[in-house]
Amino acid sequence: MTKTLTRRTFLKVSAAGGALLVGGYLPGFGETSRAEAAGVLEPNVWVRIGADDTVTIMLSQLEMGQGVMTSMPMLVAEELDVDWNKIKTEWVPADLKYGNPNFGGAQLTAGSNSVRGMWKILRQAGGTARAMLVTAAAQSWNVEESACSTEKGEVIHKASGRRLRYGALVEKAGALPVPKTVALKTPKEFHLLGQSMPRLDIPEKVNGRAVFGIDVKRPGMLVARVVKCPVFGGRVESFNAEKAKAVPGVRNVVKISSGVAVVADNYWAASKGAEALEVKWNEGPLANLSSAEILKKYAALAEQPGKVARNNGDAMAALKGGGRSFERVFEVPFLAHACMEPMNCTADVRSDRCDVWVPTQGQTASHQAAIAASGLPAKAVNIYTTYLGGGFGRRGEADFVTDAVETSKAVGKPVKVIWTREDDIQHDYYRPITYVRMWGAVDESGQPVAFMQRIVQQSLMKRLGPLPPDGIDRISVDGAATLPYDIPNVRVEYIETDPGIPYGFWRSVGASVQGFVVEAFMDELATTAGKDPYEFRRGLLSKHPRHRAVLDAVAEKSGWGKPLPAGHTRGIAVMEAFGSIVGQVAEVSVTNGAVKVHKVWVAVDTGWVINPDTIKAQMEGGTLYGLTAALKGEITIQSGRVVQHHFNDYQMIRHNEAPEVDVHVVSSTENPGGIGEPSTAVAAGALANAVAAASGKRIYKLPIRV
Amino acid sequence: MISLTVNGKQYDVDVSPDTPLLWVIRDAIGLTGTKFGCGLQQCGACTVQLDGVAVRSCGMAVSNVGTKKVTTIEGLSPASSHPLQVAWIAEQVPQCGYCQSGQLMSAAALLAKKAKPTDAEIDAAMSGNICRCGTYQRIRRAIHRAAGA
């Protein structure tokens, strides 16, 4: 990939009336004007082919490391039959014509929905352009369209050996009606999809040139830190800005809806100003809330039945019907996302327009937040996106956009708001704390006869809209109500409650809880039945051949059942999440209460494959994200605030602790599933089962303590 | 005015002497490849080299840099040609990419000292650099590749 491509790719943000640069801070790189409408084939909003053969593909799904900047254009290029090395990409602004149907047409990169939501649209976009070019060529040659083929940006008439470049056809093709439907290739016809293509963003991520939100610069820009009430729901009672304003470089101290913004010439001055600021808080009604109290309340709620998310047979009767039955309680804590790039946003609010530069997962959410905070009409508010230094669900929120827009509006200058790491840990939308009661029974022959769950959790669906009429939060029961095992009596209940702590979408969301809870409980059912955990699961998956194939693959690759070094044990887990099926085996040892993860094997069926190396990378990284949470992750609420502050008390897996993750992609022709999240969901399950095998004690609570 | 040498070029910056080197590099000099991750020397995103030694620039006051030569990711090589940068691309290491400048600067300091580091030496040199995307095993492979192992 040429450097020109990657720079252009990132920097050019199209906006009404022309091209805009993000910042304009790269020397020697000027504005590039858009191709004129004449001599351009633009059959839809996703692809534009110029007379010079340039193929420009629009990017709406945002790049946070999951490879969409490459996989999305691959979908277009496959159907278009264009030379991959000649494509250019362009980020789109906030505009619903680029929306993801899996989010009701909003522009959002979340829920492992980029490929799942967009593959059909993008392949059709490429296929439509190709069909028009073929028609144009066939008409030029006066031959049947069916006698023409396409390859690397040319239409070919094989019988006569004639060829026409796409660029030579755009004018003629542009005059044709856009076909309503086009035939898409079958997976067997793919030549690009299924190949590991080097990611387009990587070259500028090894030399410091990649521009993240925190790197945005605007002429006359100030930098702000926002001091927020440590207690959730608290607000500013009063503040004294005298000492903050005495810090050289501090320009303004202004109250905004989330706290007090200290605005300065640069970050260091803003930071010192923020430390010097005196604020009196009204801590509000949550000032005495704690995680322990929340769990106590959840336990009380779990004494009563919940809304029934799934019911097969009669689980309650089966539990009383003899055999070995038992009840367990599982607890998982709040979790912060801890993206490496602290939350930030740059806004320039004028009387008649508002421009926002932001590393966001959601252009639509950012747009709405900026409209609300600026008070300007939608068409006067522009969102420009940058690379994201991690997202994991955190950047689907727009609180940092509100901070920047309100601050810029208050001071009348462009302002970049930068959060500290402490702000990030203490003011997140956390993976919700969850309390789960579980009951199970196995009969004399060792067959499981009952599986029952009662899940108490804040409603994740309520963050998106009202709950459906049945009161079931499908996100909270993801991985539970979808239990694949052939057990005659299954009941899953859900109880909604909200203690008031901000909560949201944390990589793999509801499944991040159930991948642990369900698979740890299944393992205990297996050992209660005196069966091998792999064979036990396998025997219950005859109606789910994809699950079984994945389970078999991960067992084989990990050498399941074969001897291990002294003190090492294995754990296994499998689940469907985000449309993909993932199986994992973790190999661990436990020494004096310290868990060492030696290696993790992953098998995944994610349907037909776009970029195989990206799938591997996501399985590797997603697994470590899940292991980090299972081994170390805990956000604790005390006195209405978060106890943890930083990477020293909210710890991450580091180089010396990171196991190798060995990924095997199981061949499949099913439609694509998601890849960003499934391996995170199941990681704690496989790990907890391996630790239980090592220590002899089942794990019911995260993070794991032995 | 404080004078310092960054990537072979001398800069005179008008900043408060307690300003961390990180913010001088980013805000005063304008090189944004060096990242802010935590401000407490816990994550390594801000790693630069001082006379070839990897340091966390968020925890070093600019007044303490003295005459030591500062190298940032932008100065690691001309045209992204350092063997580690080449290996990083070959192994497709970065995901979000935010921590990778720091990872590369730590790895480059290691290789300058140890031409063929062992896994244990990689752990010792690199464990101050957090990657939330979990690219650790690819980083390890890329370091071995760059070392010609």
Image: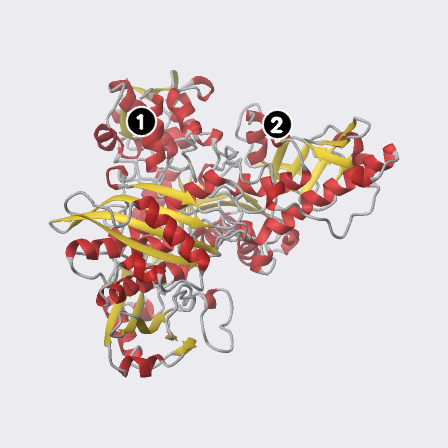
- Residue A258 visible? The answer is no
Q: Is residue A522 left or right of residue A2?
A: left
Question: Which residue is drawn at the image coordinates 30% and 47% (left, top)?
Answer: A276
Tell me the number on the disc at residue A386: none
Disc sitting over residue B107 in the figure: 1
Rendered image quadrant of residue A508: bottom left
Question: The N terminus of chain A is located in which quarter?
Answer: top right
Amino acid tagged 1: Ala
Residue type at mark 2 is: Gly
Q: Position of residue A181 (x, y in %)?
A: 74, 52
- Answer few, some or many: residues within 10 Å of disc 2's Cα (few below 14, many 20 plus, some between 14 and 19): few
Residue A649 versus residue A415: which sits nearer the camera? A649
Quadrant where the C terminus of chain A sits is bottom left
How is the protein colored in the picture?
A: secondary structure
Left or right position of A200 against A14: left
- In this rendered view, identify the residue nearer to me: B20 or A472: A472
Residue A433: where, in percent of width, then height?
Answer: 32, 64
Residue B33 visible (yes or no): yes
Establish if A520 lies above or below B78.
Answer: below
Q: Residue furthest front?
A: A445
- Marking on residue A30: 2
Relative image position of residue A140 (x, y in whole percent) = 86, 33
Parent chain of label 2: A
- Dot 2 falls on a residue whose secondary structure is loop
Mark 2–mark 1 Cα distance, whole angstroms, equals 34 Å
